[in-house]
Image: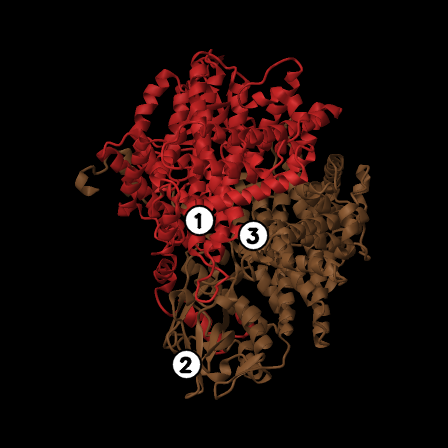
Chain colours: A brown, B red
Amino acid sequence: MNTLAQERRKAEFDVESMKVVWAGSMEQLHLSQRMAHLVANDPVFRKDFRVTQSRPDLFKNTLRKAAHAWKLVQTLRLTEEEATKMRNYIDEPAYTDLHWGMFIPSIKGQGTEVQQQKWLPLAYKQAILGCYAQTELGHGSNVQGLETTATFDPSTDEFIMNTPVLTATKWWPGALGKVATHAVVYARLLTDGKDYGVHAFIVQIRSLEDHQPLPGVIVGDIGVKFGNGGYNTMDNGFLRFNNVRFPRDQMLMRLASVTKEGKYVQSDVPRQLGYGAMVYVRKSIVMDASNYLSRAVTIATRYSAVRRQFGAQGDKPEIQVIDYMTQQSRLFPLLATAYAYRFLGVWMAWLYSDVMARLEKNDFSTLPEVHACTAGLKSITTSTTSDAIEECRKLCGGHGYLCASGLPELYAGYVPACTYEGDNVVLLLQVARFLMKTLSLLGAGKKPAGTAAYLGNVRQLATQNCQVIKGADWLNPTTLQHAFEARSARLAVNCATQIAEASNQEAGFTELSMELVDAARAHCELIVVTRFMEALKRELPGREVKSQLQVLCNIYALSLITARTGDFLVTGYLSHEQIDLAKAKLRDLFRQVRPNAVALVDAFDHSDYYLGSTLGRYDGNVYTNLYNDALKDPMNQSPVTEGYEEFIRPVIKQQLQLSRSKI
Amino acid sequence: MNTLAQERRKAEFDVESMKVVWAGSMEQLHLSQRMAHLVANDPVFRKDFRVTQSRPDLFKNTLRKAAHAWKLVQTLRLTEEEATKMRNYIDEPAYTDLHWGMFIPSIKGQGTEVQQQKWLPLAYKQAILGCYAQTELGHGSNVQGLETTATFDPSTDEFIMNTPVLTATKWWPGALGKVATHAVVYARLLTDGKDYGVHAFIVQIRSLEDHQPLPGVIVGDIGVKFGNGGYNTMDNGFLRFNNVRFPRDQMLMRLASVTKEGKYVQSDVPRQLGYGAMVYVRKSIVMDASNYLSRAVTIATRYSAVRRQFGAQGDKPEIQVIDYMTQQSRLFPLLATAYAYRFLGVWMAWLYSDVMARLEKNDFSTLPEVHACTAGLKSITTSTTSDAIEECRKLCGGHGYLCASGLPELYAGYVPACTYEGDNVVLLLQVARFLMKTLSLLGAGKKPAGTAAYLGNVRQLATQNCQVIKGADWLNPTTLQHAFEARSARLAVNCATQIAEASNQEAGFTELSMELVDAARAHCELIVVTRFMEALKRELPGREVKSQLQVLCNIYALSLITARTGDFLVTGYLSHEQIDLAKAKLRDLFRQVRPNAVALVDAFDHSDYYLGSTLGRYDGNVYTNLYNDALKDPMNQSPVTEGYEEFIRPVIKQQLQLSRSKI
């Protein structure tokens, strides 16, 4: 029996039940399996040669896949949910991500009923292909600083769009470079002699007949990005406007409009409605994080079980690297984190529906808290996941550096998540601002709610230290919860105190930025721990499923505590002894996970096709496949390399032309 | 005046003098400038299209560069030092790295006089091209586990080399895949019915006439590696042997030999002589770390000064991102680290000469300490540098993700340093073992020396806490030194105590691996801090050069303390208040560096060619060049993308063939 088969026999829980928990439900599991199977068995979706293709070939092949996928959607009459799942399994950034994920939602969120009726049917049948053109060469996070202009001309009832300076060039939008026919463009609205700030417009940029850029439109691809494959399948683009005219009704007018006389009019639609979409996007990002993390962890776990190193005794083979404490301490917390983020994503789906229900009733009371919490969760889950993918690559040793491991592409394709939809540091500063505000309102008797409710208890949290006396105490959920609450509250209070001492509050905030980022991170990690523990209070069917998750939840919490001892020690909440107890308990928990590790990653149910990793194969047949893959590499087409006659033979034969004139 | 010119006027020190300090001497500076200039101005060495080339084209172009460089070496009669510098500026991993850096040194270190006289002249004139074939598909760090065999056949006075199992396939050696004619191969020596363990052999693998693999040799490239460009210019290869025979005298016999009767004979050359080469290699790795780190920091610093975001007031532009505390707290410690590693490298060069002098006198007394210290320094400098390159990329925001930033290639090309010449975690465990041994010998009255001397003072270090009362106290070198010594000593003692309590010492060591890794890291960081402070005791000419370095040294030390507060707090060495003082002092120091930041990276003297980064250009003209570079991208050869007719038009025109049979 091979190594992974042996590992699977060790598992102490029912893997099939865990698959259902991970997928969310039996229906979701079956949906995923159907779509994964559909993609994996269709030769058009082959992806193993992705890293050896030139960028233009790679891109053209992505166009092929997108067209083929669209054909499948129609032929098989896939639902929107099925189509989205299928695109996920195709596992390749493509223009359709922006069309379905940004262009259409923008029109839905910011277009009037009339505009939606005009544009959405065209977009739904892909008779137009859209992108979302916000960021500019000189402007990223600061949307209010955008420089593209849309000047209203009442004489023709049109807007005139311009790129007044180089830094106003639209830069980065996906699907823009080579594909989109239309763009939702963010630009400063100038009318009636005034600058009304940034608004959104639908602008056609390419002909629907021959795909040529329209007059006045300069558009193209911004060039190669990090990594083999990765985001290079996407045509992130640039876009400049030279007096491009379009009718007034292409301004997205749900929140504000311009009359044909050029008067700017705000609608009475509450601005807060946009928050719903933002929560939805952030929920999706967190779910993506758990997905990417689970793929990296699957590869590293399986390979760590297959790989052996040192410690051979007599006829016995070397030790599996997964048995080393150094490997376990780096790998198992990431395994636990993948599960933690999955439960977090489920909770955020609930949060989204809660927000939407409130918005319908014009109840905006929870928005500041929801805004801060989702911003922070987007930040910490994407930062942690991108670091974790690299860590998994390193856990695979030298072979992790081969593209055959699948991990380089996974990293390069994932890491932009740290930047898009809000830079992760900027987002944490938003969380910090919310925390400072919440603390300042405590004095006025305002009770914090939701994920910030614990701050109402700040005095007790600031004074009562950890009660752990023996290792087992660390498994008490109340103890863990209290530890994370106390850490977060104390870091926040420490910041608030120091800011209060500054002569200028804003300057104090700026000065303490890094401490505030730490406080924000602590707040967010508390939320993740809490959601994981809450999820385990529900019934989870299947033999030993819940007990396994309980172990992982404890690993998640304790590994954070032992990784961030400074936070817990600085205010005397924990003692040296309590930290040593936490570390020892963590090692115990690693021992409990060890026999279940392979089964716990099997429960993610990722197919070999989806993983795209020789190291992470389900059958563990790593070495034969690494070797056979290498034989097929384009570099091995001939035994003697191209360039030998020109550049190697003359060196060996001392026949290089050495005349000075030749150099 | 443009932004960077303004920045340069703010500098408070003499940049030209700092360049001399960084380079090591005026002679070194001039040498570097000459070689950098030679490479930058030779069109053969162009590297800007590297990320758009297919792997075979990329590789062929590297062969062209290597041949051209060799031509230059001969035509210009370059010294070995000049040639090495030139290869460094060509900035592309190539087979010559292995030929000069591993193949030749192996023969020098392990060959007899006779063998050196036979092989070295051929290698020096590149009439043969060599590689270093140690690692196997199934075996990396554990050299003793290698499975390739070299069986002596006394009947023909030959060795017979074989790859008995798949996992014995040589895997990873650079220059092996497509170029090398010869390899130093590590294999188990079997003779006289016995396995004598792993030894080195010179084996010819390709014909010197037509470059075909010799009979019984199966050799090729192992495939695409992480990143665009990066190590894909190298032909990391695989190699299998099927009864390959070669004469007995191709075993490298300096340390042990086989007689023609097949008798294994050890020579009386001390095994320790090999340590010299190891120290030399590790010194080079540390120098490389400072070089790579300085390039990444140059790019991030210049771009942070050019880039503006938020905070525009009235007609004033937005704030330079380098003015944000969040940017400074992430960037300036890395700037300080680049300088710290440079001084560390200089010290390691001294250490190397000291070791060599001792070895000549058969004085092996310092070897265990030198072995541990250089292992640890290799580990922490390469781990820190690879993380720092990624951090610099993130500090460049979205644009850092473009290959035009130069940072993706820098990262992908650097990160293998964490794995080669010893996995970084394995190396730290070696340091930890040395620390535990040193502590255990204290009882026996053995006084530790060199970088471990402070452990002789362990009792005082374990009891006397930090004396800092006000912020300025943190600038006292004795205080900083004591803090790092106390942290390291206490972490080590804590490990030793816990191991002593274990029933089995070896099991205790394994169990505590992660704590031991932390202790080892603390020990190594102490060494770096100490070497930086020591370097500043010497005279350093030039206006305000030393004072600037003093600021950087303090930043290096204090940023480590504030990043690892847990270590310092856990044993009560520091108080909460002292940490807040350290953080506040660090912010002061950042303010002192701020006006000098651009000049401090100018002092690295990296040319635009060498940096290969649009974001890091000396003139700061970032946006124009990003835009112009994009226009030249292969994707923008035509306004309408390839694939439009086949895959986009049918979608837009609803003309996809939807018959099921087509799918």
Residue flagged by tag 3: what amino acid is it? Gly
Residue A13 in sight from this viewpoint: no
- Furthest residue toward front: A503
Q: Which mark is residue A81?
A: none
Between marks 1 and 2, how big is the CA–CA gap? 40 Å
Q: Is residue B568 left or right of residue B277?
A: right
Residue flagged by tag 2: what amino acid is it? Arg
Q: Quadrant of residue B122?
A: top left
Height in image: B80 above or below A49? above
Q: Which residue is mark 2?
A: A245
Q: Which mark is residue B301?
A: 1
Between marks 3 and 1, how big is the CA–CA gap? 37 Å
Q: Going 61% across and 19% down the picture, which residue do you hit? A: B456
Instruction: For mark 1, name the chain.
Output: B
Residue flagged by tag 1: what amino acid is it? Thr
Residue sitting nearer the eye, B637 or B446:
B446
